[in-house]
Amino acid sequence: MSSILFLYSTVDGQTLKICRRLQALAEQAGHRATLADLEQDAGIDLAPFDKVVVGASIRYGKHRPQVAAFMRARRAALEAKPSAFFSVNIVARKPQKSAPDTNPYVVKFLRRIGWRPRQVAVFAGKLDYPKYGFWDRQVIRFIMLLTRGPTDSAAVVEFTDWAQVDDFGRRVAAM
Ligand SMILES: Cc1cc2nc3c(=O)[nH]c(=O)nc-3n(C[C@H](O)[C@H](O)[C@H](O)COP(=O)(O)O)c2cc1C
């Protein structure tokens, strides 16, 4: 049995939903799993955990700055134990951009922080037009128009492939 910390950086909750699923999987497999908000609990003590998993969503081309800041500040502790990273974004709904080495945000982010977690994953997120403010909705609709996604302003579409999440959960348990 190991103790796993899942740290999430989310705006609309999809990354947290994925972490909750990973937590449930880990607990079913007999591990202890703890969830924490990376932005609110950036000072969390990593020592009590055997493994650390960081999940972060993309907004306007970037993970939130706290994610890279956390990795920079905690690099020694993170490198001392098995750790994993996953990114959540809407571009990952495209099969050719759905892997860690083909998703542009993940490739760029890992290159920039210069740290290679033991496991990396990328999951397609959720589109929720009714939840967005006016300008965000217009921008996302325009991007969807360009990339042939849903443009109906009432659309709510969860692109997350839960089988992929489960597979990542098994890899995390085994690392
Ligand atoms: C304002 C806004 C900007 C976004 N920008 C991007 C983007 O640049 N690239 C992308 O792939 N997805 C983008 N997304 C999609 C989010 O990454 C996706 O909705 C994800 O599920 C959000 O995860 P969260 O709920 O954990 O924050 C954007 C979403 C919103 C609302």
Image (cartoon, helix red, strand yellow):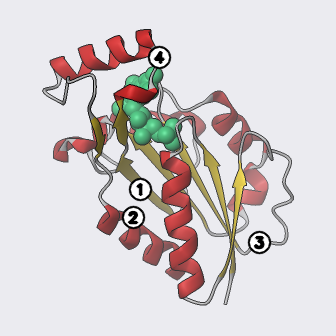
Q: Secondary structure at mark 3?
A: loop
Q: Secondary structure at mark 4?
A: loop
Q: CA distance from mark 1 to mark 2?
A: 8 Å
Q: CA distance from mark 4 to mark 3?
A: 38 Å
Q: Are marks 1 and 4 in contact (CB under 8 Å)?
A: no
Q: CA distance from mark 3 to mark 2?
A: 21 Å
Classify 129 as above or below 72: above
Of badges 4 and 3, the one in the foreground is 4
Q: Which residue is mark 2?
A: 165
Residue type at tag 3: Phe
Residue at figure coordinates x 42%, y 15% from the top left? 136
Along the viewing direction, whichever of 113 and 131 lies nearer the viewer:
131
Ligand 1 near label 4 (Cβ, under 8 Å)? no
Q: Which residue is mark 1?
A: 121
Looking at marks 1 and 4 on the same chain, the residue that comes earlier in the sequence is marked by 1
Looking at marks 3 and 2 on the same chain, the residue that comes earlier in the sequence is marked by 3
Ligand 1 near label 1 (Cβ, under 8 Å)? no
Of badges 3 and 2, the one in the foreground is 2
Residue at figure coordinates x 30%, y 68% from the top left? 163
Other residues around mark 1 within 10 Å, as few (<14) / some (14–19) / many (≥20): many
Q: Which residue is mark 4?
A: 133
Q: CA distance from mark 1 to mark 4?
A: 29 Å
Q: Quarter of the picture for ligand 1? A: top left
Q: Which residue is mark 3?
A: 49
